[in-house]
Amino acid sequence: MSLSYRQPGVVLTDHRFTVPLDHADPAGETIELYAREAVASDKAGQDLPWLVYLQGGPGFGANRFIGRQAWLDRALEEYRVLLLDQRGTGRSTPANRQTLPLRGGPAAQADYLARFRADSIVRDCEAIRPRVTGGAPWTVLGQSFGGFCTVSYLSLAPEGIHTALITGGLPSLHAHADDVYRAAYPRIERKVAAYYDRYPQDVAAARRIADHLLTHDVVLPNGYRLTVEAFQALGQMLGTSDGSHRLHHLLEDAFVRTPAGTELSDAFQEQAQTLLSYAAHPLYAVVHESVYGQGARPTAWAAERVRAEFPQFDAAKALTGDGPVLFTGETVHPWMFETDPALRPLRETAELLAARTDWPALYDPARLAANEVPVAAAVYHDDMYVDTAHALETARAVRGLRTWVTDEFEHDGLRTGAPRVLDRLLALVRDEV
């Protein structure tokens, strides 16, 4: 029995669904999916069209809104919204260091997690859609990785979609993970340069922290080993609208004087461990590169290998001169499975996924070229997380897809630009602009 309850301006209902782990074996093992239905309080009794939201990631559960926050407020004007925790995330059957040993050893865990990509998420949506909408197609809103899933949806089951809305999430249809990261590092470098232009004092601050980490063994309160590479990974923030400001505030509180000498402050360490730990979203690290896997070529720790082509990201070399220490972001590396206590037990599992050579195709270019579903996508001009050139190439490959290319927002535009971003996409698919 579904449970309904209220928050300001909205009626919420919890839903749980049982779906096959492997949709090619519907009589086999099952997992549970959780989704939260949201409807405006004054429309709770109305027959409204459905919108299903696919969160970014991979590895993150759907937003936990309080009332009618952010884009949800605009969506509730005309939709009944389903906030889906994709498989393995949130309240759907969880996949993490605590639960995965129930599967067996690393090989069994890797085989299990190979079914946690966009193709399986799409088939989950199709399995639950008849139970939610009575069989009617729904509008899909995909943010970031959720947009990747939406393009897979258009490839695998377009009959289930009434309208597709994508924000910061048009994937390359063909690029290998190497190509993705070869395009990513120059974007990241541009974001770091813009950050240092805004906060030039942080060049010295970052160099000082990096030098300290190269000469000290720093273990954060939660057991995370803070290496210089881990410090650089804090650049993940620079792809969001307020990330440069938050990184600046973090660095300015880095050091305190103690009887034993200068040390990294408790405040800095507390914030750093929260930002760096994957405890709340381990799938982001474990399956991150597999979201690009198609065919027999392994991903093989692409971000780590490609980084060697960009020596300017080597902090130790930067400190031998007077250049800036460059931050990184949107990259997952094998050393993370040594520094992060939440990932250490999953190192061998991640290695097996990185070596996997039997990835099924995620996209159908021929079907996308014949697409009949109204689609609109917000493409952020210099998105740190998704390459703009790749996104526009895909936009041209999907029949009828309309784009809004903007430099007004960063990758989190759906959150910071609400309701304008959603308004614009709806206007595009309705030929109002």
Image (cartoon, rainbow, N blue to C red):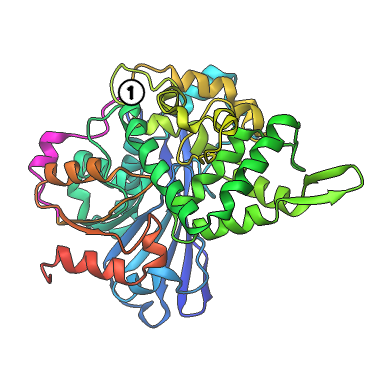
Say if residue 16 shows up in the picture. Answer: no
Label 1 packing within 10 angstroms: few (<14), some (14-19), many (20+) = some
Residue 325's image quarter?
top right
Against 60, is 214 above or below? above
Q: Position of residue 174 (x, y in %)?
A: 22, 30
Q: Is residue 159 left or right of residue 17?
A: left
Q: Is residue 17 left or right of residue 134?
A: right
Against 399, is 25 above or below? above
Q: Is residue 368 left or right of residue 96?
A: left
Q: Which one is nearer the viewer's eye here, 239 or 427?
A: 239
Please report the residue visible at 34 percent of the width from the left and 73 percent of the height from the top: 74
Query: Which quarter of the rendered picture does the C terminus lie within?
Result: bottom left
Residue 334 lies in the magenta-colored region: no
Q: Which one is nearer the viewer's eye here, 355 or 403?
A: 403
Tell me how many marks there are. Answer: 1
Q: Is residue 270 left or right of residue 261?
A: left
Please report the residue visible at 12 percent of the width from the left and 71 percent of the height from the top: 432
Q: Which one is nearer the viewer's eye here, 89 or 47?
A: 89
Please report the residue visible at 41 percent of the width from the left and 66 percent of the height from the top: 416
Residue extending furthest toward the bottom: 42
Q: Position of residue 301 (x, y in %)?
A: 45, 23
Residue 381's image quarter?
bottom left
Q: Position of residue 8 (x, y in %)?
A: 51, 79
Name the amino acid type tagged 1: Trp
Which residue in the protein does label 1 denote?
359
Against 109, is 77 above or below? below
Q: Which residues are magenta?
A: 359-373
Residue extending furthest toward the left: 370
